Amino acid sequence: KAGVTQTPRYLIKTRGQQVTLSCSPISGHRSVSWYQQTPGQGLQFLFEYFSETQRNKGNFPGRFSGRQFSNSRSEMNVSTLELGDSALYLCASSYSGIGTDTQYFGPGTRLTVL
Amino acid sequence: AQSVTQLDSHVSVSEGTPVLLRCNYSSSYSPSLFWYVQHPNKGLQLLLKYTSAATLVKGINGFEAEFKKSETSFHLTKPSAHMSDAAEYFCVVSDLRAAGNKLTFGGGTRVLVKP
């Protein structure tokens, strides 16, 4: 089975721009979660989608949004980029989306904001 | 609220010697606990997980962890370190009260393996 894929792998944007990141989960997985990883804050939960509905949300401003499509693929969008948004954005998928499920992570998208 | 504390930000070991990575958690409910490893410029790979079955959990690559409820700990060990174990390790707790998946990560422990 193919793993979680994320595109693009690298992105460079300037402040004020917006960006869309894409995540394709493992086939059959219905839950997709997004995490931000920075040297200062570590790994932080952004949000989780299940069956096209946002089920959980972390403590991030409204500039961070996401959606999930009927094929479980997910996108996250960051509007009005700030320098502090530079990070590795990781997507993870799981089968049933319950807490005991294993989440499988993609390689991440490294976003640099200049 | 749940939280995870990894007691060492860096651990240095010699190849062939034991590895111990310490993790303490705080959770109001019986948690699911995980250890993930991240090699440079890579995503996270699951090493092992605890979900209220056996308290001693065996994972991949010779790693194992013991869940101790009385000490709220979930330490990761490996009897003999290999050069390929050099990476960053994350102890993770899952909030079982949430409707779905919501992981809380520890700050990470970076492991250096000396030849």
Image: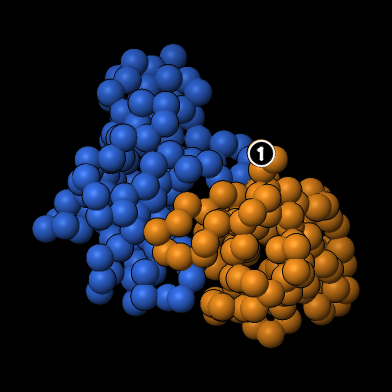
Chain colours: A orange, B blue
Q: Residue at x 20, y 58 (%)?
A: B72
- Answer with left or right where residue B24 lies relative to residue A51: left
Q: List x then y, in percent, for residue A62.
A: 69, 85
Which amino acid lies under the numbered mark 1 shown in the image of this protein?
Lys
Is residue A10 toward the left or the right of residue B71 in the image?
right
**Residue B82 falls in which quadrant of the image?**
top left
Q: Residue at x 43, y 35 (%)?
A: B111
At x 24%, y 50%, the residue is B53
Image location of residue A67, percent across then percent down: 73, 74
The location of residue A3, given as percent across then percent down, is 66, 43
Q: Is residue A40 visible?
A: no
Residue B37 is situated, as x and y percent measured from the top left of the image, at 48, 41
The correct choice, above or below, for B85 with respect to B23 in the image is above
Say above or below: B82 vs A10.
Answer: above
Farthest residue, direction bottom: A62
The N terminus of chain B: image quadrant: bottom left
Q: Which residue is mark 1?
A: A1
Residue located 28% across and 40% down the image: B57
Q: Is residue A110 left or right of residue A94?
A: right
Q: Can the viewer see residue B72?
A: yes
Query: How many labels, in total?
Result: 1
User: Residue B11: which quarter of the image?
Assistant: top left
The quarter of the image holding the C terminus of chain B is: top left
Of helix, strand and loop, which one carries label 1?
loop
Q: Nearer the viewer, residue B41 or A90?
A: A90
Mark 1, chain letter? A
Residue that protrudes farthest toward the left in the picture: B70
Q: Is residue A61 above or below residue B49?
A: below
